[in-house]
Amino acid sequence: MITGATALAWGPERPTFTGENPADYVTFNSITNNPQVGDERNFVRIREAGTSSYVDEMKLQPGKEYEVVNYYHNNAKTSLNESGVGIAKDVMLKADVPTVVKPGERGKVSAAITSSNANPTRVWDEAYITADTDVALRYVPNSAVVKSNGAVNGQVLPTSLFTTGALLGYDSLNGVLPGCVEFAGTVTYKLKVDAPGFNVTKQVSKKGANTWQNNVVAKPGEIVDFRIGYDNTGSMQQDEVVVKDALPTGMTYVPGSTSLKNAKAPNGSAQADAVATNGLNIGSYAAKSNAYVTLSAKVGQELQKCGVNELINTATIITANGNKQATATVTVDVPCQPDECKPGVPKGDDRCKEVCVPAEGQVVDANGNCVTVTGSLPTTGPAE
């Protein structure tokens, strides 16, 4: 029996019946003591695939599948079928599922049963879903299956179930459904819950050495290699992944040095120089796949200060699901003469002025200015 707040999950308000005293006309899901489902007004329920019990509310977990069941029953008395008065016409089921559920939201999984000669002509119900992280819901193809005592048992409903609706029936999916529980049935379909997730790493090596680490020591004029790693740790594909590299003051990009290594190019493929400017689009990546972008940069002759200079290189991965950054450091120790403020720069020179200190989300560009790392994020589309 539905009580309290859950009573608002179904509609519209309508007369109810019992199995012992069904309706004298065509009406759907209005019996309150069905031995199989209880109160038929509560005809949309959900469970984790492979478990036994359907419930009215479920917390979703990324990577798992869930089953939604929709019960349908023309409550007209059996005695009305012979005359045709008790036979429902144009019976259709339409389901609605949110494409995305965010933390703090209570998503609705709903269904509506319609019939041209029923009273009311449309009845509906809802189940609820929540999640602790952003998740996307994807219909599992060909999973919407009818269970019935009739010839339609085992048939798969078309994907119009989620748009304009799909016809139900007993002898065929023709929208004709006699009255009585023996002609009732269910439609069960599956949803896959996907969640985005990714990691980014940044490492540096002496030129050509391939000894990747978080920090190397270099000299003015020396070239070093940087490697940016991207790992799709989520359960869904990420498209249009963009890699940006922001070199610190004191380092310059070596043109033509960018290479991309992934499943399609395991030995690496040459890429445009966009990684050091607007960003390099490295394509789409399925769950649990990865990629590496390598590039080279040269340490300048004029550095910011005498003694130890820590040149921090920042990489940014930009996706439809957010951005992440990682850094690697090149340490350069430069001696200065007593009259120099910086290596090779005499005291009093304009170049002695201090550059900005970048805040969170900022990097220092080639001119010594603090700039915010930005990227255009596409809008997450519906699950397919």
Image (cartoon, rainbow, N blue to C red):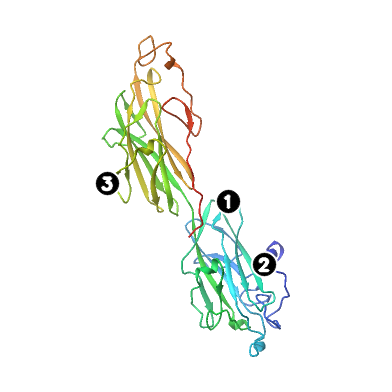
- Residue 365 lies, with reference to residue 241, above or below; the image says above
Separation of marks 2 and 1 at Cα, in angstroms: 24 Å
Q: Few, some or many C-alpha atoms within 10 Å of disc 3 (few <14, some 14-19, many ≥20)? A: few
Separation of marks 1 and 3 at Cα, in angstroms: 41 Å
The residue positioned 64% from the left and 67% from the top of the image is 125
Left or right: residue 144 versus residue 111 is: left
Identified by mark 1, the residue type is: Pro
Nearer to us in this view, 113 or 45: 113
Q: Earlier in the sequence, mark 2 or mark 1?
A: 2
Q: Earlier in the sequence, mark 1 or mark 3?
A: 1
The residue positioned 43% from the left and 50% from the top of the image is 239
Whether pointer 2 and pointer 1 mark residues with C-beta atoms closer than 8 Å, the reply is no
Residue 256 placement: quadrant: top left
Q: Earlier in the sequence, mark 3 or mark 2?
A: 2
Residue 165 placement: quadrant: bottom right
Q: Which mark is residue 103?
A: 1
Q: Few, some or many C-alpha atoms within 10 Å of disc 2 (few <14, some 14-19, many ≥20)? A: many
Q: Which residue is mark 3?
A: 267
